[in-house]
């Protein structure tokens, strides 16, 4: 940019203990950097609000390095190229990739891909149904869970952005779909509106082992796990032989300050010849176009429903983020930082 | 049998807490039963002494039902058919299958298969190298671990009957083989005699995470886990992306009286896109003949070494069993109850 521009950014000032506060992540003003060789400058339109970001704020080893203290919080963003130092991107193009909780991101071009809107698409869909949120259940359920018609698929955080799609895709594939969610309203929504076969409200059930057994009378063949913890433990006692656990997330432990033990029923993995597979949608990057095409067809024919919750204003990002951990978001959470 | 015969049996009188004592498993005399329809009567020659038996003595759900109080302890046996009520077995034939810690077993014929000795074979080999002990590493490493040449295979209980074969098969397949064992003598044996690339004495190392990192400088691609517990926890921090954990056993927890938490580093399964698969050799039953043929070839050409430890006398069975949990056995443990 020829004229230096001032932007706002949310900087990680210290590693949070438990819930993230605005002493951990602080709003600052800064000059917008210029892109170096191989980099692009992006005006961010939407920031993606995801549980995994909590993990990147900590120091424990993960699939991405920890966010450095003093850097903006890392997140997926959608935005417009303002300036490009690589040939494959031009100013004005819409791109999606790994940026930050900030108004402008300078990033390596290799971390971004071009978004080509089709009729009916909106840019924000590439952070939700045509982004990780849609593709995570798509590849996770089909490529890792490998459900067969007639099998039972159980999913936790079932009214969430990912979980609600897991159940719907399971139904499309001829499975029994059972969801675990945190309110009667959410349970009603996934059964009555989304077509799940059964739902369990984990906040009101006292014996999750028995509740899962009732909702899954033929046992669980595929468990799509977004939460870990006690629900995973209860599920392990309901697995069928040769069951597959898609280990997609463990939101129940992300805010913990002590080492969290694995499931007490870990032994059941052996007793039932089950498989637990850690799953990252980014491993399927080269199959994204095919996945997006399939999702677009299902959305277009009304077979898949999804919800987005858009919160306006960079300054509200941290509040939006904490909604996730309270289970109070309704659909894929995003922050709009520019129109 | 026309004349009633008296035999000795080791009966499970109560469920053990921790280490199994001779108040839990008691030597009794009893009349030998006659086989019913579809059953055979076997004179047991060798009893197999395996860690999994400890699990069957408890009440927790497993891949076989708990042994009933008042029944003989269940175990794999090799013996000679004395009386048969099915057409496919005849008196005098050598058979292997699920019997008990007793001199004679009456069992459903479906639980037994015929042993056909080839030149150089001994009957007891069908409880060791040509039985579960040899076939567990064979199918577990090759079908579940799926090691590729140049990868690093780590195995716990590496001087044990199963573990020592895991490392040797890994070497045959062109991998780096690293073993974890409980004494310097065991470590020397697996490196100098069996050809492992490195060994770790877990009793003298204080920081297992660092020890594994040193012995596996390229990280761990396949972990063949026989023990669980802290060694599994330390290994999880050394896994490469897309690593495979063959969950074959968890001897570290079999004698525990409290619920045992899963690994504290359970999260690493996701962080490294790893897979943990519970593995039972019995799932590969229909491929046993092919596995035995391959093992026989490797043994015949000197590429595989194995050790057997035979203890004489049914009355010594419980002492033999407890050797396993003290790590004091040397090779596959068996009890000879008849010549």
Image: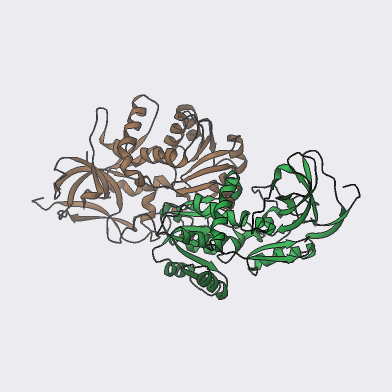
Chain colours: A brown, B green
The quarter holding residue B45 reads bottom right
Q: Position of residue B162 (x, y in %)?
A: 58, 60
Residue B57, position in %: x, y? 72, 54
The image quarter in which residue A303 lies: top left
Q: On the rendered structure, is A316 left or right of A42?
A: right
Residue A338 versus residue B182 in the image, above or below: above
Residue in the foreground of this view, choosing between B257 and A53: B257
Nearest the viewer among A187 and B152 is B152
Q: Position of residue B112 (x, y in %)?
A: 70, 46
Locate residue A250 relative to residue A310 in the image: left or right.
right
Q: In the rendered image, is residue A93 in sight?
A: yes
Q: Residue A260's x, y, as percent?
A: 50, 57
Q: Residue at x 73, y 66 (%)?
A: B311
Q: Is residue B108 left or right of residue A236?
A: right
Height in image: A68 above or below A198?
below
On-image quarter of the C terminus of chain B: bottom right
User: In the rendered view, would you say B104 is above or below B304?
Assistant: above
| Residue shown at 82% from the left, 43% from the top | B35
* Rendered residue at 57%/40% (across/down): A204
């Amino acid at each position: 940019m020829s004229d230096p521009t001032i932007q706002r950014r949310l900087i990680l000032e210290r590693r949070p203990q438990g819930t993230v506060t605005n002493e951990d992540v602080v709003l600052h003003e800064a000059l917008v950097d210029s892109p170096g060789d191989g980099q692009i400058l992006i005006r961010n339109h939407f920031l993606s609000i995801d549980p995994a970001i909590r993990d990147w704020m900590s120091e424990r080893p993960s699939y991405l390095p920890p966010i450095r203290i003093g850097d903006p919080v890392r997140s997926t963003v959608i935005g417009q190229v303002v300036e490009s130092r690589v040939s494959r991107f031009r100013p004005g193009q819409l791109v999606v990739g790994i940026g930050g909780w900030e108004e402008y991101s300078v990033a390596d071009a290799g971390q971004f891909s071009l978004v080509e809107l089709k009729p009916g698409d909106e840019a924000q869909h590439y952070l939700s149904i045509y982004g990780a949120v849609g593709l995570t259940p798509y590849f996770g359920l089909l490529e890792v869970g490998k459900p067969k018609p007639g099998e039972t698929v159980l999913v936790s955080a079932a009214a969430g952005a990912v979980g609600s799609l897991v159940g719907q895709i399971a139904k499309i594939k001829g499975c029994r779909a059972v969801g675990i969610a945190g309110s009667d309203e959410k349970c009603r929504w996934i059964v009555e509106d989304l077509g799940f076969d059964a739902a369990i409200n984990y906040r009101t059930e006292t014996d999750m082992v028995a509740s899962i057994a009732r909702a899954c009378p033929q046992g669980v063949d595929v468990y799509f796990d977004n939460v870990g913890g006690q629900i995973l433990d209860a599920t392990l006692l309901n697995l069928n032989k040769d069951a597959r656990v898609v280990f997609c997330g463990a939101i129940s432990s992300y805010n913990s300050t002590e080492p969290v033990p694995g499931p007490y029923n870990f032994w059941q993995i052996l007793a039932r010849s089950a498989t637990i597979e850690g799953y990252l949608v980014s491993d399927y990057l080269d199959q994204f176009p095919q996945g997006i095409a399939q999702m677009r067809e299902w959305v277009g024919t009304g077979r898949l429903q999804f919800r987005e919750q858009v919160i306006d204003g960079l300054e509200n990002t941290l509040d939006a983020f904490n909604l996730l951990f309270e289970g109070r978001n309704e659909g894929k959470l995003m922050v709009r930082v520019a129109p």
